[in-house]
Image: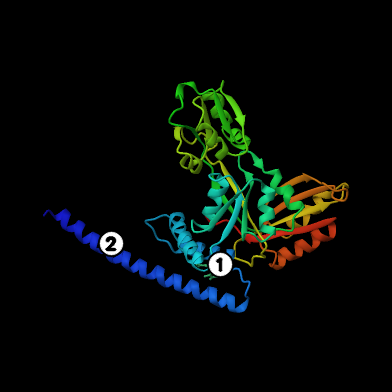
Amino acid sequence: MSDTSINLDELRQRIDQLDSDILNLISERANCAQQVAHVKLAEDKDAVFYRPEREAQVLRRIMALNKGPLDSEEMARLFREIMSACLALEQPIKVAYLGPEGTFTQQAALKHFGESAVSLPMAAIDEVFREVEAGAVHYGVVPVENSTEGVVNHTLDTFMDSSIKICGEVVLRIHHHLLVSETTRRDKVSRIYSHPQSFGQCRKWLDAHYPHAERVPVSSNAEAAKLVKTEWHSAAIAGDMAAKLYGLEHIAEKIEDRPDNSTRFLIIGNQDVPMAGEDKTSIVVAMRNQPGTLHALLEPFHRHQIDLTRLETRPSRTGVWNYVFFIDFKGHRDEPRVAAVLEEVRLRAADLRVLGSYPIGVL
Ligand SMILES: C=C(O[C@@H]1C=C(C(=O)O)C=C[C@H]1O)C(=O)O
């Protein structure tokens, strides 16, 4: 036996020993999580076991402690799955998302809650809201903005008619691929299916490579992937999940015009989330239509040095609400300086609703 094979055996024995240790530690962790669940139940029989702020703290702590060689995000993803499995022992989390199966929203839901969550596809954004409001699921996941294409208006509008709360956010890097089925004549692609947002994100690439192909907008990327299964002259733009689900092949990968293309999704629920340490707050404010309105709205944020991360205007849908602003900023509603700003803005506004304070997306 050569030296390398002796080393290999030794290393494998060491790995076996480490795996046994990891196994025992994960089991011990799962036992602890089960005990936490019993404590929560003893305090409140309708307790929700999932705690967004605690999970964010666990993941942030792991990332801070990590010394490599695995990178911190990779390590946090592993712990994400361990937490997800621990939680599922007591109460599998049910999550409604904007479907169908294979969409980026499903990918976002699993990234946020882990693979042990039960994810249920809904046909429309308002259905996701309704399922959460009715208590049929614990949480919902909806897209809210894309770095290339901008805001998902329908999601913002749905908040105006709902009492739902924002409990978290998750940002997903969006990679689009040009996909075909086994039977597609790759040199004869004359039609491309995708969601309008995805066409927007791949516009330049399509103009350069498929200027003459007909672009057919459909309701989701997953729907596009499904359609090309049966058409020999068609291709779809969709992501990895849809490609895998429908067994499609890649003609071209990562065809998005901007390499940093990403989408932000919101986690919606019925829960007020306590402070995690690094939080964001989302509010919707209605202002009267008079000069100086926007300045009056933003001035308190500036004075209290609160960092705005987003400001969107939507047309009001009632007579009272002339202008409606959706504002995201850093901080939690329970922090005194945030509470002070909210109080000041409330006095200046026709209406103000806090949609939620929640941990800034960790992964
Ligand atoms: C164990 C708890 O409950 C759940 C499981 C967690 C975990 O496995 O670390 C963290 C938060 C909760 O979602 C807890 O609240 O500490």
| Numbered mark located on residue 285 in the image | none
User: Residue 9: horizontal and vertical position, in percent?
Assistant: 19, 59
The residue to which callout 2 is attached is: 15
> Mark 1 vs ligand 1: CB under 8 Å?
yes
* Residues at marks 2 and 1 touching, judged by CB atoms closer than 8 Å: no
Q: Nearer the viewer, residue 21 or 305?
A: 21
Q: How is the image coloured?
A: rainbow
Q: Nearer the viewer, residue 298 or 351?
A: 351
Judge left or right: residue 319 versus residue 103: right
Residue 114 visible? The answer is yes
Residue 119 vertical placement versus 201 (above, below): below
Residue 59 vertical placement versus 265 (above, below): below
Judge left or right: residue 158 versus residue 348: left
Quadrant hosting residue 339: bottom right
Residue under the point 61% across and 71% down: 47
Secondary structure of the residue carrying tag 2 is: helix
Quadrant hosting residue 133: bottom right
| Numbered mark located on residue 54 in the image | 1
> Are there few (<14), some (14-19), or many (20+) residues within 10 Å of tag 2?
few
Judge left or right: residue 351 versus residue 123: right
Looking at the picture, which amino acid does disc 2 mark? Ile
Q: CA distance from mark 2 to mark 1?
A: 31 Å
**Quarter holding the N terminus?**
bottom left
Q: Nearer the viewer, residue 129 or 311?
A: 129
Looking at the picture, which amino acid does disc 1 mark? Arg
Mark 2 vs mark 1: which is more N-terminal?
Answer: 2
Secondary structure of the residue carrying tag 1 is: helix
